[in-house]
């Protein structure tokens, strides 16, 4: 094979493999000069060839591969030629090379595709192991680059598309190649006359024709889930080819995903378009550093003929952070298909800019912050607090209807001597990534305004925050005001707020527990402090928790006025690191002492925004209406009514004004919200924790249920939003990075939300407040009467019992057992919560929960059974599970909320029917369509174990266990 052209510059050849420290001397010798193994039938010298037995005869050596030698071989029976890779066991001193060789065989056997040099056969003759692969007569892509340099853009894209098709097959089988490069991409073409196979490839390339493409050499490949593969890579080992290695391969940080191969493909595409890789260095460490930290050169500066669209593809493939690249080879290939077919990219600019005349005023600022995107996002995206902190005036909102009867929100505030009024478009955001705000003005110096905030992880650590403002001004006065408002009145306050937020998340902000991420501590007057001292004395006499009291008083003194207008006790207790019930009791006592005032927020169950605020439960109607999402709903004291407080006006003046109502801070359960135009296709790239989610729109007659599973599903999901109002089974996706490709098939625009389906866990509901002794003592008139029963019809109910708690007490003792049971209960609550389960009863050895859907209950039961079931290994507590469906009622009993009903009683009897091998379900559950779908997805089946018609009990287990039980 010809020498690497880059050797002339003295840099690392692209076939240099960085060795694993665990490699033996023999393995290092085998890996010293790898080759692609492409057939070049005239270049091998005569040598003694290994004997592979009567079935295969070796003709000549083709090259030395990373895991052994590659030969041209002949099948004696069919007379077909193959590429045969051999591994003579006597050339090494240990078994590692053999294990890697066996691993390549295993991976190749799992992947078969026309764009992969497929495995044909494996064998062993004496002490020589070998694998037989398709013979590709032609040349590798490295040879083509050496001869031709860069290729035409369209042909380069076509080649990469074929590469992606082959790599797709590996990714779909959970395999990452880890060594994609031109030398491992084989090309073949039809020979004309006496030309060689390599010349045939060059002729096809020069004529603009696409040769056949095959990916080869899976010697370094591994499963994404390494537990499914042979674990051969030692800690801190670096495997791959330095020119084409993704940053995470260089550092071995985190889980290696298909996006590592996307990076290598991007490097190869860059080289096809420019004739050289983006990073070149004469030192391995420097080259690795360039991959990790340096931005790739701009394609347009090296090859101005490359289109912007292709440049954007290359730029995305070469992002340092895996989550910013294409998810996998399929994702990249579909984007290339859009270019080759003349289609439109699903990554449209959002929000879509309104039509305008004239040029735009723009300002863009960047901050490199130390905090992570996850930590910064809740504070940066809180537009209510950010707007107030930078000095924007409060906003007055109103709702209007257009000619078609559709509602639109309008806002207004005073700017100078005039009042500006605008149409407030629904905010668009993806949690942890970006937030977009569009306002179209009816009057004033501006036509419209867009604010775009984006967070990206920095390769060096921390995050880059970008704030981009666009304004369409009306005339020269609009330009002048835009310049002044943005550059003079906007930039400096924003800088101050963002830097303070960064100090807050990094723990460097000075102050006590009550310190605020946006503003410095407030100071109060001498008279107010004297009043607080009197309150403190009174509350201490009432024996409230001293630590909670001192923390609450500090918060009342220092917190911003905005925060004192709506104090949510559970959320604040967690923020201040206080025990929730003790802190809530302190807040209740503070109401009787004149420090706080009590209120009730009635929350919309759809958008979860407070639609109404009441001072007493008796004032509440049984039904309410949400203006934000035009939803009528029942007022459920156990779910939609939240206990909140505000500071007493004689202590401090709370800021009751509104600065923004459309941001993510008002909808923390919403992962993403986008506006889609009619016929538009849009990608939503987000991160999902394990659990259940819902895709919904107030304009659609259906919702789409999503289950994020860390052990199953795809990283990319296509969702068609069409007119069909039908039962849609839950879509199981991979928990972690997830790209939803949404297509709006409707004739009108849609507001689409991706929401967590779990109930809010940061609120104390009216039902929960009834359980607090201090509440019943201080507010006897607020007890829930029996006429406020809340029927829950046809909900799914689950009971979980710890079966070996007595044995644990006898074996481990009281203290250790109580600690371990609490740990188990925490894990159970977490699993129930992830599937929108709500704990309604709890005892020493059991938990009872309700679910909105049968599928949610079954998925939760399956997860719990795998982790704590009687057949789970290495667990100190064993559980049994029963699932039923029926009607449960919540009512007040002796001043407390209790759930009662026939279904609750039957669930207890059903739990007693649980056997020692699985969980049980009632006949109502067994006949439910969602139950059957969930069982099929999880490869589970039902077996009737007791009862007749209407009272039957079914055991849930794997098919293998059921077959075994049947045979016995």
Image: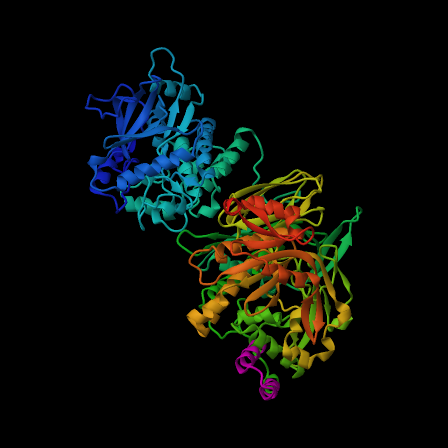
Vertically, is 38 above or below 357? above
Q: Position of residue 237 (x, y in %)?
A: 30, 47
Q: Position of residue 614 (x, y in %)?
A: 73, 70
| Foreground of the two, 107 or 956 | 956
The N terminus lies in quadrant: top left
Q: Is residue 820 left or right of residue 921?
A: left
| Foreground of the two, 124 or 629 | 124
How many tags in the picture?
A: 0
Q: Quadrant of residue 209?
A: top left
Vertically, is 565 above or below 321? below
| Foreground of the two, 342 or 866 | 866
Q: Determine the residue located farthest toward the front in the rendered image.
A: 968
| Foreground of the two, 834 or 801 | 801
Residue at left offset 59%, top offset 89%: 541
Q: Position of residue 595 (x, y in %)?
A: 64, 81
Q: Determine the residue located farthest toward the top in the rendered image.
A: 193
Q: Is residue 317 left or right of residue 718?
A: left
Asked whether the viewer can see residue 761, the reply is: no
Residue at left offset 47%, top offset 40%: 328
Q: Magenta-highlighted stretch: main secondary structure?
A: helix
Q: Does the segment drawn in magenta span residue 312? A: no
Asked whether the viewer can see residue 628, the reply is: yes
Q: Quadrant of residue 723?
A: top right
Q: Is residue 441 left or right of residue 491?
A: right
Q: Which residues are magenta?
A: 531-556
Q: Quadrant of residue 8?
A: top left
Vertically, is 242 above or below 671? above
Q: Does the segment drawn in magenta span residue 545? A: yes
Q: Position of residue 655 (x, y in %)?
A: 65, 71
Its colouring scheme is: rainbow
């Amino acid at each position: 094979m010809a020498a690497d052209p880059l050797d002339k510059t003295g840099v690392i050849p692209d076939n240099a493999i960085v060795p694993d420290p665990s490699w033996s001397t023999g393995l290092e010798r085998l890996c010293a000069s790898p080759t692609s193994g492409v057939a070049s039938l005239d270049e091998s010298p005569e040598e003694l060839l290994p004997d592979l037995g009567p079935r295969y005869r070796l003709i000549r050596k083709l090259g030395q591969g990373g895991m052994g030698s590659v030969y041209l071989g002949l099948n004696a029976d069919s007379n077909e030629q193959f590429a045969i890779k051999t591994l003579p066991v006597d050339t090494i001193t240990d078994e590692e090379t053999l294990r890697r060789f066996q691993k390549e065989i295993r991976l190749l056997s799992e992947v078969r595709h026309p764009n992969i040099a497929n495995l044909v056969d494996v064998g062993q003759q004496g002490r020589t192991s070998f694998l037989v692969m398709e013979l590709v007569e032609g040349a590798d892509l490295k040879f083509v680059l050496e001869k031709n340099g860069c290729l035409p853009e369209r042909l380069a894209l076509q080649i990469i598309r074929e590469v992606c098709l082959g790599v797709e097959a590996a990714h779909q089988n959970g395999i990452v190649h880890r060594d994609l490069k031109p030398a491992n991409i084989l090309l073949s073409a039809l020979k004309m006359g006496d030309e060689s196979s390599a010349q045939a490839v060059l002729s096809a390339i020069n004529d603009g024709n696409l040769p056949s493409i095959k990916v080869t050499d899976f010697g370094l490949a591994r499963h994404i889930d390494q537990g499914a593969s042979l674990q051969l890579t030692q800690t801190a080992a670096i495997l791959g080819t330095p020119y084409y290695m993704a940053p995470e391969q260089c550092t071995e940080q985190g889980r290696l995903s298909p996006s590592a191969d996307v990076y290598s493909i991007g490097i190869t595409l860059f080289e096809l378009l420019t004739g050289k890789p983006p990073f070149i260095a004469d030192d391995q460490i420097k080259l690795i550093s360039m991959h990790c930290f340096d931005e790739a050169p701009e394609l347009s500066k090296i090859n101005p003929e490359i289109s912007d669209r292709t440049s954007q593809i290359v730029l995305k493939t070469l992002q340092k952070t895996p989550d910013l690249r294409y998810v996998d080879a399929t994702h990249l290939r579909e984007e290339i298909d859009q270019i080759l077919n003349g289609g439109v990219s699903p990554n449209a600019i959002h929000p879509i800019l309104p039509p305008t005349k004239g040029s735009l005023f723009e300002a863009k600022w960047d901050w490199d912050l130390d905090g992570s995107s996850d930590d910064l996002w809740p504070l940066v995206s809180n537009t209510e607090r950010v707007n107030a902190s930078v000095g924007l005036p409060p906003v007055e909102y109103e709702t209007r209807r257009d000619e078609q009867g559709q509602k639109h929100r309008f806002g207004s505030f005073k700017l100078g001597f005039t009042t500006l009024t605008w149409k407030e478009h629904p905010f668009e955001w993806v949690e942890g990534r970006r937030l977009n705000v569009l306002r179209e003005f009816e009057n004033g110096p501006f036509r419209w305004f867009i604010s775009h905030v984006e967070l990206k992880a920095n390769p060096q650590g921390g995050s880059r925050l970008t704030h981009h403002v666009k304004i369409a001004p009306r005339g020269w006065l609009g330009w002048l005001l835009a310049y002044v408002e943005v550059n003079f009145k906007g930039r400096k306050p924003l800088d101050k707020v963002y830097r303070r937020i960064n100090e807050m998340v990094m723990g460097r902000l000075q102050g006590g527990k009550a310190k605020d991420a946006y503003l410095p501590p407030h100071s109060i007057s001498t008279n107010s402090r004297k009043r607080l001292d009197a309150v403190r004395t009174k509350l201490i006499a009432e024996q409230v928790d001293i630590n909670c009291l001192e923390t609450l008083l500090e918060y009342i003194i220092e917190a911003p006025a905005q925060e004192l207008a709506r104090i949510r006790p559970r959320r604040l207790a967690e923020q201040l690191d206080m025990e929730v019930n003790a802190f809530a009791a302190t807040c209740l006592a503070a109401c009787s002492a004149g420090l706080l005032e009590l209120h009730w927020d009635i929350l919309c169950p759809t958008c979860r925004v407070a639609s109404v605020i009441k001072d007493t439960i008796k004032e509440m109607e049984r039904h309410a209406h949400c203006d934000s999402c035009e939803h009528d709903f029942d007022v459920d004291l156990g779910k939609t009514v939240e206990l909140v407080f505000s500071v007493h006006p004689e202590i401090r003046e709370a800021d009751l004004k509104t600065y923004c109502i459309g941001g993510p801070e008002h909808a923390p359960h919403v992962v993403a919200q986008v506006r889609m135009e009619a016929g538009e296709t849009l990608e939503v790239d987000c991160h999902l924790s394990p659990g259940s989610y819902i895709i919904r729109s107030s304009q659609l007659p259906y919702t789409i249920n999503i289950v994020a599973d860390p052990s199953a599903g795809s990283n990319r999901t296509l969702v068609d939003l069409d007119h069909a109002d039908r039962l849609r089974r839950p879509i199981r996706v991979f928990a972690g990075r997830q790209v939803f490709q949404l297509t709006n098939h409707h004739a009108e625009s849609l507001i689409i939300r991706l929401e967590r389906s779990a109930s809010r866990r940061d609120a104390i509901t009216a039902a929960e407040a009834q359980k607090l002794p201090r509440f019943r003592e201080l507010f006897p008139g607020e007890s829930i009467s029996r006429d406020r029963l809340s029927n829950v019809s046809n909900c799914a109910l689950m009971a979980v019992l710890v079966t070996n708690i007595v044995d644990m007490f006898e074996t481990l003792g009281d203290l250790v057992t109580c600690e371990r049971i609490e740990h188990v209960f925490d894990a159970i609550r977490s699993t129930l919560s992830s599937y929108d389960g709500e704990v309604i009863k709890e005892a020493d050895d059991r938990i009872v929960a309700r679910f909105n859907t049968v599928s949610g209950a079954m998925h939760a039961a399956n997860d719990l059974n795998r982790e704590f079931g009687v057949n789970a290994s290495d667990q100190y507590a064993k559980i049994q599970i029963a699932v039923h469906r029926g009607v449960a009622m919540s009512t007040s009993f002796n001043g407390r909320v209790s759930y009662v009903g026939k279904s609750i009683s039957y669930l207890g009897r059903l739990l007693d029917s649980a056997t020692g091998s699985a969980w049980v379900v009632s006949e109502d559950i067994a006949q439910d369509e969602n139950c059957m779908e969930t069982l099929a997805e999880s490869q589970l089946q039902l077996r009737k174990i007791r009862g007749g018609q209407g009272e039957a009990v079914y055991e849930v287990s794997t098919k293998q266990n059921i077959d075994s039980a049947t045979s016995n």
